[in-house]
Amino acid sequence: MSAEVLVVGAGPAGLAAAAALAREGVSARIVDRDGLAGGAYREIDSTLVLASPRWFTELTQERAAREQDARSEYVTAGEYLSYLQRFAREKSIAVERARLESLSPEARRWRAALVTDTGVERASLAAVVIATGMWSSPRWPELEGARAPRVADGCVIEHSQRFRGAHVGERVLVIGAGTSAVEVAERACRDGASVTVSARSARVRTVPKKLFGHDLHELSTLLERVPRWMASGLCRDRKTVLGTDQGFEAMVRDGRVRVRGPLSAIDGRGATFVDGAVERFDRVVCATGFRYAIPFAPPGLSTMDRGRELPETTAEGESRSHPGLFFLGFPCAIGVSSEFLRGIAKDAPVVARAARRLARLRARPL
C-alpha cells in the first residue's frame, strides 16, 4: 500500500512525526534532502553542549529512556545525533533521499513533486507534515559586506551555521546578541581566540543555566500552559532568544570577551563600527539567526508573522488556509514551546492523530 502521509525532514521533528504516525497506524513516507536521520545535528559542531537537560531533548516522553540515558544531565550535539540515529533504528524509520520541490492541492488531496536521484516523482497524498526546521536558511545581517561566506584578504567571513571553532590568537568578531552569538563567543574564547561581540544595544544579556538548583527549562514549563493567543506577540515578532550562560558572563568580566556596539560595514580588512572605529579581525562570524523558509509552500499560504515566514495554524498544527498541510517544529505551531525539542515531543502525537483522521477521510476509493 502506498503512503498516505508525507513527512518532509528527518531531523528531530521529522523523526518524532514518523514515530507518532506509526503508533497511530498511519502509512507514512519520510523524505530528507540528504536521506539520513539527524537533520541539522549532522552539521552542528559535535562538541557543542545543548542548553536543555537531557530529558527535555527526548522525542518521546518515555520514562525508560530517561533512566537508561541518565549518565549525564546535559549532552553534546554529537551525542544527540547518536540518539537521533538510534531512535530511527529502534523505531524502524526508513528515510528516503528526496527534496520536496512543490506542493499543490488537488481534489481534496495533495500533489507533491519530489526530486530524487532518478528524476522528479509526483505523489498523491492525504496529508503532508512539514518538519524541515530552519537550519538550511541562515539569516545574514543587513550590513554592507555581509552577503555570503567567503575569505577576503585573509579575513574569514561566515555564518554561525558553519562555525567550527577558532585558532589560538585569532581575532574573532561575533555579530549578534542571541543564543548563537553567546555559543560562538564561548567556543572561540575557549579555543584561545581574542573575541569581540558586536550587539545593536552594545549589551548581551544571558540567562543562567540553573536557578534555585533547578534547570531554567524546568521552570519554563509553566509558560507552556499559556494559551497561544496570549503569546501572539511573541509568535509574530520573533524576539531574540537569550543565550544560556555557560561561561560567557565570566569571560566578559575577565576581559577575554569584549562587547561593543553595532557595525556599519565589514570587509576583508575587518570591521567598521558606527562610532567610526575600524578594527582588524581574522574571522567574522554572523550569529544572526535563521529563517523558516518554505520555498515549496503552495500559493496563498496564510501566515501569522510580519516576515511572512511562519504559517498560521490550528490547535492541531494544521494550516488554516490549506487543510491537510501540517507543521511540526515551527514557532507557535501548536503552543509556545512548539519550536523547541520538548515542544516537538508534545506536538507530534497531536499532529499524528489529526493526520490519521484526515487520511481516513481522504483515503483513495477502491
Image (tube, grey):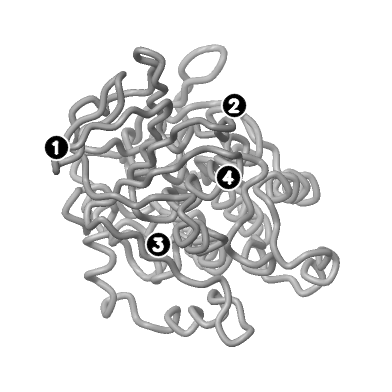
Residue at 46% across / 17% down in the picture? Answer: 120
Residue at 24% across / 71% down in the picture? Answer: 232
67 on left or right of 105: right
Secondary structure category for the residue under label 1: loop
Task: From the image, state whether disc 2 or disc 4 is nearer to you.
Answer: 4
Disc 1 marks a residue whose amino acid type is: Gly
Q: Which residue position holds label 2? A: 97
- Give the quarter of the image for residue 29: top right
Along the polypeptide, which appears first: circle 3 or circle 1?
Answer: 1
Q: Which residue position holds label 4? A: 11
Q: Label 3 neighbourhood size at 10 Å, few (<14), some (14-19), many (20+)?
A: many
Foreground residue among 207 and 57: 207
Q: Which residue position holds label 1? A: 276
Task: Quote the CA–CA distance across marks 3 and 2.
Answer: 25 Å
Along the polypeptide, which appears first: circle 3 or circle 2?
Answer: 2
Q: Label 1 neighbourhood size at 10 Å, few (<14), some (14-19), many (20+)?
A: few
Q: Label 2 neighbourhood size at 10 Å, few (<14), some (14-19), many (20+)?
A: some
Task: Quote the CA–CA distance across marks 3 and 1.
Answer: 48 Å
Residue at 65% across / 33% down in the picture? Answer: 36
Along the polypeptide, which appears first: circle 2 or circle 4?
Answer: 4
x, y percentage for residue 328? 46, 55
Residue at 30% across / 60% down in the picture? Answer: 203
Quarter of the rendering occupied by the N terminus: top right
- Give the quarter of the image for residue 312: bottom left
Task: Quote the CA–CA distance across marks 4 and 3.
Answer: 18 Å
Q: Which residue position holds label 3? A: 317
Residue at the outermost front position:
255
